[in-house]
């Protein structure tokens, strides 16, 4: 198996490149296509997330079974039959879901979106193309599960970077020389989605073990019947995740004019960087935690778990705090639009802090995932869903994006204050206090103090580039203080220093 440190580093390099190139392209999209068209892109992003309701826990189940196969928990024949059965389910759901969305395009264009400049025909065509893209990208989730479960994250990171390059830069000549209508943009994205699906499928098949002589693959659903309980629990958890993270965006897509929804999507996109920072760590450690559990290595599992928590507390926590302290400055430096910055800053601040809390609060879920026991998370998910959905609808209708953002922040605070204690006590009694004090709170508190200190010296009303420098200084100070508060990072720096000293004395 590849080194987990290498996997995390590879994931980060890929994620930063993919996210960075996508964010840098936003001003170009708005200038060429208009704010309503960018609102349509935000709507497409939200639809992709809602489509994951059809996943039914199958993607993480595929990832976990792949990790268990490499850990020696299941044999090659059983594993290949699981892959074949899940492949049939993915294909069927992809066709049904894609067709349902395709034939709903007329209703969405006419009765849901509030466009004032884009004609109905343009909206209808764009949404129809979206349906095809989403269906193909969702089908690729199965093959991503195989690749991630095999810990081939270096290849996946490179492939994602390649896709991001042709997706973001390749569309420039299309918008400049072919046409800037939304259907042109989404037509090009459909072509990229096809390349993505074929590439993932071919590499995943290459990774699969050979079937023993005389054995034949079967589409029989009975091969995954023992996994259904775990898969369905994951399905409910995933559904709650989608509802909690996307309900606000769905409600606001109906309430707000499409142009205003574009500005809201811009603020949420910036805040999503916090989650993008934490996601590579989760992707890298989930197969390793499952492997440690399959091997009975409890000490190794805790070691990986705590190291990764500290890493996310430092990196994602620093990003969330920087966005909170410098929301208006960051937006102004990026867009050079003072009014937009004032309006979007409260939305960015709320979502960034909520995402930072979520990034840390996801770790108990990773622990349950590795153990194959999601009952605590399942119960919490149902309870939180009953509170969150009506709260988001109420807040979004009354206060727009800001109200939805603060509901998101409060619910994540409640989750991180409740779930970790229950889950740690269930699986590893005695871990909770150390995890909270050493791996989370101490690190976040140090970063927050640094952010407050730097904020005292910021100049109000300064120019665009001065504000960009202030954001950079604040972010660096928060990151430095957070890293200094992390025992794991201090230990790593000490080892690195000793290594260089030893080489210097040779």
Image: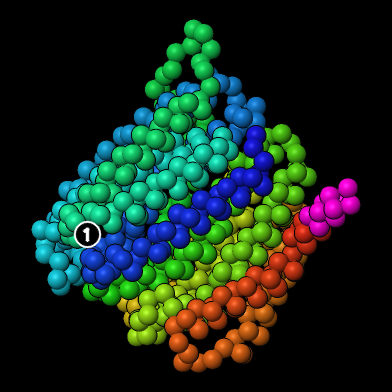
- Of residues 248 and 267, the one drawn nearer to the viewer in this rendering: 267
- Of residues 231 and 59, the one drawn nearer to the viewer in this rendering: 59
Q: Give the residue displayed 35% in from the left and 81% down from the top.
A: 337
Q: Give the residue displayed 48% in from the left and 90% down from the top.
A: 462
Q: Based on the picture, tell me whether residue 497 belongs to the magenta stretch.
A: yes
Quadrant housing residue 364:
bottom right
Quadrant housing residue 54:
top left
Question: Residue 434: horizontal and vertical position, in percent?
Answer: 77, 62
- Of residues 179 and 483, the one drawn nearer to the viewer in this rendering: 179
User: In this rendering, would 203 be left or right of 10?
Assistant: left
Residue range in magenta is 496-506
Dot 1: few (<14), some (14–19), or many (≥20) neighbours within 10 Å? few
What is the magenta segment's predominant secondary structure?
helix
Q: Which residue is mark 1?
A: 176
Relative vertical location of residue 77 with respect to residue 237 in this rendering, above or below:
above
User: In this rendering, would 63 be left or right of 423?
Assistant: left
Q: Give the residue displayed 59% in from the left and 74% down from the top.
A: 475
Relative vertical location of residue 162 with respect to residue 31 in this rendering, above or below:
above
């Amino acid at each position: 198996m590849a080194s987990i440190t290498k996997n995390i580093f590879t994931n980060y390099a890929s994620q930063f490149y993919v996210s960075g190139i996508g964010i840098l392209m936003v001003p170009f999209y708005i200038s060429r296509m208009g704010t309503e068209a960018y609102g349509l892109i935000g709507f497409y992003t939200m639809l992709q997330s809602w489509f994951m309701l059809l996943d039914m826990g199958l993607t993480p189940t595929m990832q976990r079974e792949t990790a268990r196969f490499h850990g020696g928990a299941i044999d090659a024949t059983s594993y290949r039959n699981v892959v074949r059965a899940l492949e049939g389910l993915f294909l069927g759901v992809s066709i049904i879901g894609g067709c349902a969305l395709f034939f709903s395009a007329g209703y969405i264009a006419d009765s849901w979106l509030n466009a004032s400049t884009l004609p109905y025909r343009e909206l209808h065509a764009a949404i129809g193309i979206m349906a095809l893209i989403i269906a193909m990208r969702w089908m690729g989730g199965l093959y991503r599960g195989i690749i991630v479960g095999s810990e081939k994250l270096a290849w996946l990171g490179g492939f994602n970077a390649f896709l991001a390059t042709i997706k973001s830069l390749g569309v420039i000549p299309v918008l400049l020389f072919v046409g800037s209508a939304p259907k042109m943009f989404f037509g090009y994205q459909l072509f990229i989605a096809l390349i993505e699906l074929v590439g993932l499928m071919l590499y995943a098949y290459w990774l699969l073990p050979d079937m023993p002589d005389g054995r034949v693959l079967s589409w029989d659903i009975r091969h995954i019947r023992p996994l259904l309980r775990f898969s369905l629990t994951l399905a409910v958890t995933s559904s709650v995740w989608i509802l909690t993270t996307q309900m606000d965006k769905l409600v606001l897509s109906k309430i707000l004019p499409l142009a205003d929804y574009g500005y809201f999507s811009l603020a949420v996109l910036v805040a999503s960087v916090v989650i993008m920072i934490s996601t590579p760590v989760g992707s890298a450690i989930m197969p390793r935690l499952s492997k440690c559990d399959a091997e009975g290595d409890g000490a190794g599992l805790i070691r990986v778990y705590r190291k990764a928590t500290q890493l996310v507390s430092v990196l994602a926590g620093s990003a969330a705090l920087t966005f909170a302290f410098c929301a208006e400055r960051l937006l102004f430096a990026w867009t050079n639009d003072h009014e937009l910055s004032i309006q979007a800053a409260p939305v960015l601040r709320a979502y960034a802090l909520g995402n930072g809390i979520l990034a840390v609060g996801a770790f108990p879920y990773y622990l349950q995932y590795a153990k194959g026991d999601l009952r605590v998370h399942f119960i919490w998910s149902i309870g939180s869903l009953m509170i969150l959905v009506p709260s988001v609808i109420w807040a979004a209708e009354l206060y727009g994006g800001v109200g939805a953002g603060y509901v998101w922040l409060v619910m994540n605070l409640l989750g991180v204050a409740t779930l970790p204690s229950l889950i740690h006590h269930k699986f590893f009694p005695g871990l909770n206090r150390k995890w909270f004090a050493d791996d989370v709170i101490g690190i976040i508190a140090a970063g927050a103090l640094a952010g407050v200190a730097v904020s005292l010296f910021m100049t109000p009303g300064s120019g665009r580039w001065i504000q960009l420098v202030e954001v950079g200084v604040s972010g660096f100070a928060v990151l430095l203080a957070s890293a200094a508060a992390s025992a794991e990072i201090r230990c790593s720096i000490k080892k690195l220093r000793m290594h260089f000293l030893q080489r210097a004395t040779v």
